[in-house]
Image: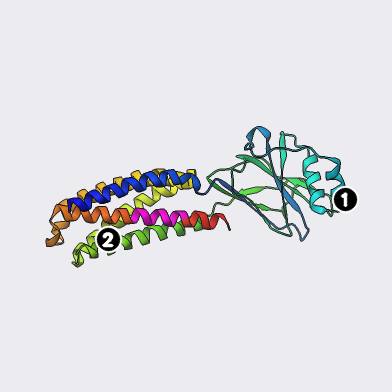
Amino acid sequence: MKRIVSILLCALVFFALSVSAFADCGPKPSLRVTLKGSRGERFYATLISKESKLPPMYIKTELTDEDYAQAENDPEAAAYIRFAEYSDGDGFVFFGIIWDSEKTRTIHMGYYPPDIFKVLVWYPDSGLMVSTGEYNCYAFSSYFTVDLDNINGFDIKAAPSYEYIREGIALLLRMALTIAVELLVALAFGYRGKKAMLFLAAINAMTQVLLNIVLSVVTFQSGFTGFIIFYIPMELIVFTFELIIYIFNLGKYDKYSGKTGKIVAYTMTANFISLLLGFIIQFVTEMGWSTL
């Protein structure tokens, strides 16, 4: 039994170190702006930002004679010219990326979007140019919605629209699966009594709810990397708490569970598997939904 515990401890430490190193390969901060309406007109949209706030990979380029020549026959090139020539009173500048409404109604920047931005929209048929006010990315993955049917002069508004339903589904899925897995591990360790299983289910439900609420707040603020950084120490806290509770109480519900070594092995195995599962679920949901 001691050998099993030692192996599990080494595996947990190895996983903690390898996952922390891998975290930088995960999803990066993102910004998604959904453009609704537009009264049936084609439009081009872009983001503008203060030059000092732009990530280093975005460089404002100067217009050339070739750009102007291309714009005569290419609507997208013409939009590029209009955005590049746009003068913003607050010092916001165009940094070279545009979206065509005939291809997409979503502005999506999945790799280091500007922290401070405005949405700029140009209608080529009428020549109308409208802009939102100044907005800040409010989370690791920030979502906004712009209603183009609600234009006030030359202004439009963007409203934060974080996908709470999506995050809620991921939260419930992670909790349900980890609780189910820990109960299956309990069966594998020989816990069969109804009272013991109900006790294990109650403790696991309590710890998983608290753990995942904390992780959801962290993910909102810091994304996948923050999730990984907090997940491992939080899981260790959960392991310690559950171990103490089980050692002093599990014997009351299952007369065969009184051996401390068995309780330690079960608790460590169950939490190690739930750690792996939670990481996989979070990584898959972040990577999958970030590409939609």
Q: Position of residue 220 (x, y in %)?
A: 48, 47
Residue 222 left/right relative to 57: left
Q: Quadrant of the C terminus?
A: bottom right
Element class at badge 1: loop
- Magenta residues, dominant SS class: helix
Viewer-side residue, 51 vs 63:
63
Q: Is residue 243 magenta?
A: no
Residue located 23% across and 48% down the image: 6
Q: Specify the color scheme.
A: rainbow
Residue 153 in sight in this render: no
Three-letter code, disc 1:
Glu
Say if 49 sits above or below 146 in the image.
above
Q: CA distance from mark 1 to mark 2?
A: 68 Å
Q: Residues within 10 Å of mark 1 (few under 14, many from 20)?
A: few
Numbered circles on residues, count: 2
Say if 261 sits above or below 254 in the image.
above
Which residues, given as a range, are shown in magenta?
A: 274-283
Instruction: Tell me the residue that label 2 is attached to.
Output: 201
Chain-order first, disc 1 or disc 2? 1
Q: Quadrant of the N terminus?
A: bottom left
Residue located 22% across and 51% down the image: 5
Q: Residues within 10 Å of mark 2 (few under 14, many from 20)?
A: some
Viewer-side residue, 73 vs 15:
15
Residue 271 left/right relative to 156: left
Q: Position of residue 181 (x, y in %)?
A: 32, 62
Three-letter code, disc 2:
Ala
Element class at badge 2: helix
Instruction: Tell me the residue that label 1 is attached to.
Output: 72
Nearest-to-viewer mark from 1 and 2? 1
Q: Is residue 278 magenta?
A: yes
